[in-house]
Image (tube, rainbow, N blue to C red):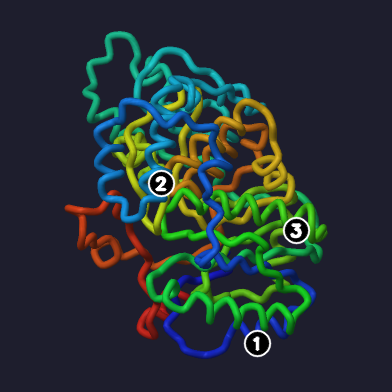
Amino acid sequence: MYILSIFWQQKIPVWDRLISKWLLFIVLVNFANAFIQNDDPSEILDIQPKCVLDEQATFAISRAKTDYCKTYLKEISCEIASNPNFFPSSLPRFCPIKTYGEFTGHCNCWRIFNNASVSNIFAINHTCSDWFADNDNRSIAETVTLYRTSFVPVGTGFKPETPPNQISLVFFFLVSGRKSLRQNERYLYRELSKLCDRYSNIVMAKIRYRTTWGSTTRLLAELDVYKQLIEDLKWNFSFVISMSESDFPIKPIEELSEFLSMFPNKNFIVGDIGNTTEMLESSETRSIFVFCDNYLYRLGHKKFIQNIIYEFGSDWTILSRDFINYVTYGDDELIRGLRLTFNFSALPSESFYHTAVINSVYCDKYIRHNLRMVNWDRKRGCTCFNRDVGDLCGCSPVIYRRSDKKLFA
């Protein structure tokens, strides 16, 4: 079941009609690219300004355009360099499914579990002995081929747990920092404020962050919105659906509400196993990133956290209220360590929730789907024009055109 398509090329005021029709359902708007920025380093870290800087940190500081940003980057770099335990080297796993937690030895491999409910998981720590029988002379290539033909990812298969009924949903719009939006941010903020005055079920976030694509502030903005939802608005919602301003719903809201009601406390998160493998091998995953002056700076490297499973995927998610409460307020060693680590990582929303759900007590509340239909054309959407000077490159979805209507049949 798909509920949304991304980047539909049709200039009609569709969301205005939808909002007017669906007043019983909750919408949250977060205008994220504002001229107000909550990134005062003195409020984030107790810093020591004198240290020997990493080569990448020195290069980043030299490129910063403002004195404020130069100082900010230097102080954070010094804090990390002077504290070898700044990032956790290892974190516990609390997944109640026993097979998920059996880590022995160190190797990069895939392992097939006997329990069909847990299926296959990628992990950086696993024994590979299950792949080979005694005196087995098959090549590694044959083993990989055997795996690929029998692959069944975690979280597949929709098995309703309760009868359908109507529930309350929060639609979370994050307006990201495209250059065209930054140039018109005051105008956009005023117009969105008018929309909030017009509809009682539309609210803007109190604190506004600059959330350029891939920036570390993206996760901070989202967690802050979740706090506002729970503490201030006190809405009785069941799920939060993250959305883009170009989303186009292709299912009635009533049908979506009934569908999600059959999966209480489940979390719809797309974890891309192929992307996870690629990301684990990339330097971006092991790098320390800090966002300042509308730019994501690379300050050095950090090691992988041991004993956990990393997962990467889409930042379009459907999260349950219980899981949102956990990632926002949870105080166990696992979630504290993940919040800290991903606050200094590029693309945090494309891995934080995925890694948290598969390592926590919510691992059995994970459905590997986000009910999206996205037009990923890698040849057209992954061009990086400034790779020689950029610290990070990525891909964008391509709009659906009228000629693509057959895809929705």
**Picture layout, residue 272 above or below residue 45:** below
At x 39% / y 26%, what residue is drawn?
81
Within the image, what quadrant is residue 49 found in? top left
The residue at 41%/52% (across/down) is: 292
Q: CA distance from mark 2 to mark 1?
A: 36 Å
**Which is closer to the viewer, label 3 or label 2?**
2
Q: Amino acid at mark 3?
A: Ser
Which residue occupies 60% across, 80% down? Answer: 190
Query: Relative to residue 388, is residue 163 drawn left or right?
Result: right
Query: Outermost residue, bottom direction?
Result: 12
In percent of width and height, residue 176 lies at 48, 65
185 or 42, nearer to the observer: 42
Amino acid type for the residue under numbered disc 2: Ala
Label 1 packing within 10 angstroms: few (<14), some (14-19), many (20+) = few
- Label 3 SS: helix
Q: Amino acid at mark 1?
A: Arg
Mark with earlier residue (3, 1): 1
Q: Which residue is mark 2?
A: 346
Within 10 Å of disc 3 (Cα), the crowding (few <14, some 14-19, many 20+) is many
Mark 2 is surrounded, within 10 Å at the Cα level, by few (under 14), some (14 to 19) or many (20 or more) other residues, namely many
Residue 261: numbered disc: 3
Q: Residue at label 1?
A: 17
Image quarter where the N terminus lies is bottom right
> Toward which corner of the image does residue 259 lie, by quadrant?
bottom right
- On the question of residue 148 being in view, the answer is no
Relative to residue 302, is residue 28 depicted above or below? below
Instruction: Choose between 340 and 257: the one closer to the eye.
Output: 340
Q: Is residue 62 left or right of residue 236?
A: left
